[in-house]
Amino acid sequence: MKMPSPRDEDDGDGPPGGLISRLQWLGGSDQLLFDKTYDQNQFHKNSDLFIYSLKTDQITQLSTQLRGREACASPDGNLIAFVKIESGRTNLALFDVKNKKELETIFTSELQGRVSHPSFINPNQIVFSYRLDGIENLYSLNLFSKKSERILPEFPNAHFANFDGENLYLDR
């Protein structure tokens, strides 16, 4: 598998194909979902979403200049929750896999807030980490109501929530 690279030549700082921050099976298929960060030019970095097919050994770029990272597929593989990088904050957004387009921002952080590591726990609910003022907490967001709430307050600074279909695993 050759990673597509926007760079014309390797500058010696990091892998020539860019950096991948998260890799996940896509909806029980033979595909892997990942994001890749790369240099857009000497002043700007960008990140996009990709799918790699184990069956065909092909990479499909889903987005262009999305500034999306830490992608997580819904259980059916039709939606992707991802961290959207914006000036002074990160937000939580949704991406439509079939139509290859960003749908909406579903959680907007405060200035200097950081959303990270979203994880679907069912088709309608996402758990993610949110850090503000140096304190990290876990939140759950319902996709129908778009309401979020802090969960598991007895685990301050827990992050990297990962749901395996039965259990929610945390890192502290």
Image (tube, helix red, strand yellow):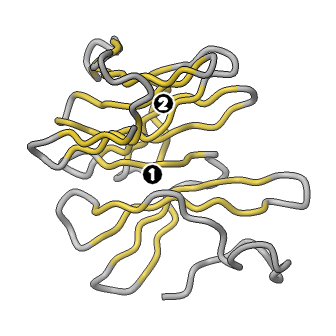
Q: Give left or right: position of 44 versus 124.
A: right
Is residue 140 positioned above or below 74 on the image? Answer: above
Q: Give left or right: position of 29 versus 20.
A: left
Question: Looking at the image, which residue is at 58% across and 18% down?
Answer: 132
Dot 2 or dot 1: first in sequence order is 2
Contact between marks 2 and 1 (CB within 8 A): the answer is: no
Q: Give left or right: position of 120 versus 64.
A: left
Identity, as a three-letter code, of the amino acid under mark 2: Leu
| Residue 135 in the image, given as x and y percentages of width and height | 54, 20
Q: Which of the 4 image quarters holds residue 57? A: bottom left
Q: Nearer the viewer, residue 97 or 151?
A: 151
- Residue bearing mark 1: 100
SS of the residue at dot 1?
loop
Question: Looking at the image, which residue is at 17% across and 35% down?
Answer: 122
How far apart marks 2 and 1 lie (CA) works out to 17 Å
| Residue 42 in the image, given as x and y percentages of width and height | 90, 60
Q: Nearer the viewer, residue 92 or 164?
A: 164
Residue 92: give its label.
2
* CA neighbours of label 1 inside 10 A, class few (<14), some (14 to 19), many (20+): some
SS of the residue at dot 2?
strand
Q: Nearer the viewer, residue 11 or 5?
A: 11
Question: Looking at the image, which residue is at 27% across and 84% down?
Answer: 55
Furthest-right residue in this view: 42
Question: Looking at the image, which residue is at 21% across and 57% down?
Answer: 27
| Residue 38 in the image, given as x and y percentages of width and height | 70, 63
Residue 129: give its label.
none
Identity, as a three-letter code, of the amino acid under mark 1: Lys
